[in-house]
Amino acid sequence: MIYLLEDEGGIRNFVLYALNNSGFEAEGFETPSAFYKAMEERLPDLLLLDIMLPEEDGISILKKLRGAGETRRLPIILLTAKSTEFDKVTGLDSGADDYITKPFGAMELISRIKALLRRSRDGDAAAEELTAGGITLVPSRHEVSCGGAPVALTLKEYELLFTLLRERGKVFSREQLLSRIWGYDFKGESRTVDVHIRTLRSKLGACGDVIETVRGVGYRIGGGALD
């Protein structure tokens, strides 16, 4: 089940039509109050969340969901008419896994949803603990810590860190990271990776420097054996 919280009727009907015709079960809500009521009865597999809403803005709703245990890991994609880097960083810092800037096409929307659902469901529970530069990542528990202190990451941030740690020393281009983590051929804003890396480093604090920028190429975590 996919929930859509969007107050504009035209966009809501467009998205629900696209989802239903792609084999998804979906339900749309015009107001946060209607959405909260539905959440009490059934939790979705993924949420599409508009930012500009009546009653309560999407960022506030996002923070509430990330603060509750049962929805802390709920895959959430922001739908936003705001396209500045500041707005995107605000959304990512608040816990969004991805964002789509309006207007958007049905194919892009479905591709992002499928990629996020696939990665959130599959995971890498069988992988062993990965460590580097004070960072510890435990895939079986989906936990990350820096110097022993827990670090709360969004799904995309976690997947970025896991990818870099799993193949430590390898330089990943932005295009490779987009393909692996977003799961589709990304066209347009390659800075999506840069924004996620920036917020990831910030959340890792003193451990953030372990993620190296290779000028003109991409990113890596320093080579050598795992700590």
Image (cartoon, rainbow, N blue to C red):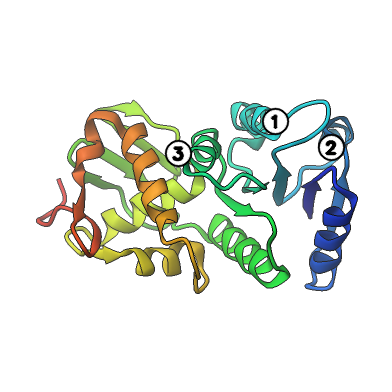
Total marks placed: 3
Q: CA distance from mark 3 to mark 1?
A: 17 Å
State left or right for residue 77 relative to residue 189: right
Establish if 158 lies above or below 223: above
Q: Mark 3 against mark 1, which lies toward the viewer?
A: 1
Q: Which quadrant holds residue 223?
A: bottom left
State left or right for residue 158 relative to residue 73: left
Position in image of residue 117 (x %, y %):
62, 59
Position in image of residue 82 (x %, y %):
62, 44
Q: Residue at x 45, y 44 (%)?
A: 142
Contact between labelled residues 1 and 2, with CB atoms less than 8 Å apart: yes
Q: Which quadrant holds residue 227?
A: top left
Q: Which residue is mark 2?
A: 35
Amino acid at dot 2 = Phe
Q: Which residue is mark 1?
A: 61
Q: Which quadrant holds residue 143?
A: top left
Q: Which residue is mark 3?
A: 153
Amino acid at dot 1 = Ile
